[in-house]
Image (cartoon, rainbow, N blue to C red):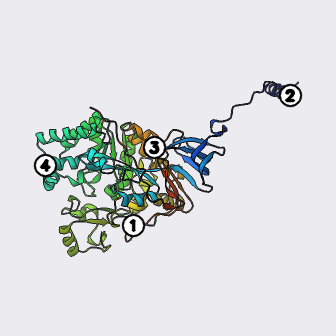
Amino acid sequence: MNRSQFLKQCGLVWASLVSSANIAEPAPAESIQDDTEYDTVILNGRVIDPESKVDGIRSIGIEHNRIRAISRDRLRGRTVIDATGLVVAPGFIDVLAHGMDLENNRYQVHDGVTTVLALEGETADINAWNAAREGKMLLNYGASVGHGAVRRKVFGKAEDAEYKGATNSQIVEMKSLIEGELRQGALAVGFGLEYTPGTSHPEVIEMFHVARKFSAPCHVHTRFGALTEPDNNIAAVEEVIAASAITGAPLHIVHVPSMALSTTPEVLQMISDAQARGMDLTACFYPYTAFGTGISSAVFDEGWQARFGIDFKDLQWAATGERLTAETFAKYHKIGGMVIAHAIPEEAVLAAVKSSATMVGSDGGLSKGKGHPRSCGTYARILGRYVREQGALSLMAAIRKMTLLPARRLEKRAPMMRNKGRLRPGADADITIFDAEHIIDKATFDEPARFSEGVHHVFVNGVAVISDGKLQEGQLPGRVVRAPISA
């Protein structure tokens, strides 16, 4: 008997033994028959989960507000959604939201978003901020304590809070206020350093020390969104990387291309290099070639043309869509309001899209239908324009930037985030189902308040808020996301 015949004979003997003992090889966990009847079952969808790297046809069973089963087999449900031909992904998490109300939620959910987090610095009173939204939100919500908001509280006058340096006693007071808000569950410490040029470098370091004490990430709009030396964005990024290295506080740099402009590739390389050296550092971007901000803010202090490499004609008044002149700029600068600055090169956006160092954050917020298209189309634009049309990144990589990476950024500070950004049994049933062949943003700079297309179903905490592409009125399942409260 040769070796081949011997192995074949051994195989036949093993098969006979298994049969006589009525033993079967165990099926993979996902294939075990499940006779449970779930509240909702999603069938036949292409499930993409960046954590497990699953990318295949699966069924998902939802019970109450959680995912209870994911299977290759058909599951039974009281409500059944046939997702044939559609992608089933974790609900998208926006780590840079500003529109924290129902008006914005209605646009955000059509973009596939299930959780909106105001982490750049919204409030100096996290309990009041959360209470104002309890039972009133379509999407999950949460916020940081804002260094700028605390500064205004300490200084008392908005202009002083922007431009004046803080005394030692004021810094001590700010530290105490930030610590108090972190003890009450604020998710992070948000900074808008470009808007508070009076903030000294030592003040930044002191606030980072407080954040480190609570493992709270510092979400920073850096000091200079500029091209000119020496006060350019590279220097601004150096400042906060140094503060993070000195204190050990986790760091997140917001909307990189809108600050770094044509130096975005260099800044992204700095971030990647720091990550490679073990720094707890992340960054985000939105996929548009213009930023938007208040025309009366410090951003447009004298010299802005040289700093951003643009002129009056590159500014668009959000309320009317008109391009500005020197005369209309002066007029609106006195009135105040949002202006859109067409200053970001497409090459900068593409570099951020492709970078392994970034996640997605919209920086969006509409007011009565006026604002920037990022408020409505950020996520569909990435999936439609940059994944499907340009092939700049894979579908798995894009979904990872929208789900798992934002969840991981916050889960050490807020353990409840461990159940978001994933599709697995036990995770929150925040789920987005979309057509990868047709999803696209429709919002424009002239018409920013337009729903994205291609999102068919969205669940927030197990509740269907979008069904067959239509908003389900009267549903307000959004829940607060916060860190544990400490004494």
The residue where tag 1 is placed is 449
Q: Amino acid at mark 4?
A: Phe
The residue where tag 4 is placed is 155
Image position of 440 with respect to 89: above or below: below
Determine whether label 2 and label 4 are within 8 Å by CB: no
In space, the residues marked 2 and 4 are separated at their CA atoms by 88 Å
Q: In the structure shown, which secondary structural element does the residue marked by tag 3 occupy?
A: loop
> Upstream in the sequence, badge 3 or badge 4?
4
Residue 119: x percent and y percent? 32, 48
Circle 3 packing at 10 Å, graded few (<14), some (14-19), many (20+), is many
Image position of 155 with respect to 412: above or below: below
Pair 2/4: label in front = 4
Image position of 254 with respect to 110: above or below: above
In space, the residues marked 1 and 2 are separated at their CA atoms by 72 Å
> Upstream in the sequence, badge 3 or badge 1?
3
Residue appearing at x 30%, y 45% in the figure: 144
**Nearer to us in this view, 218 or 247:** 218
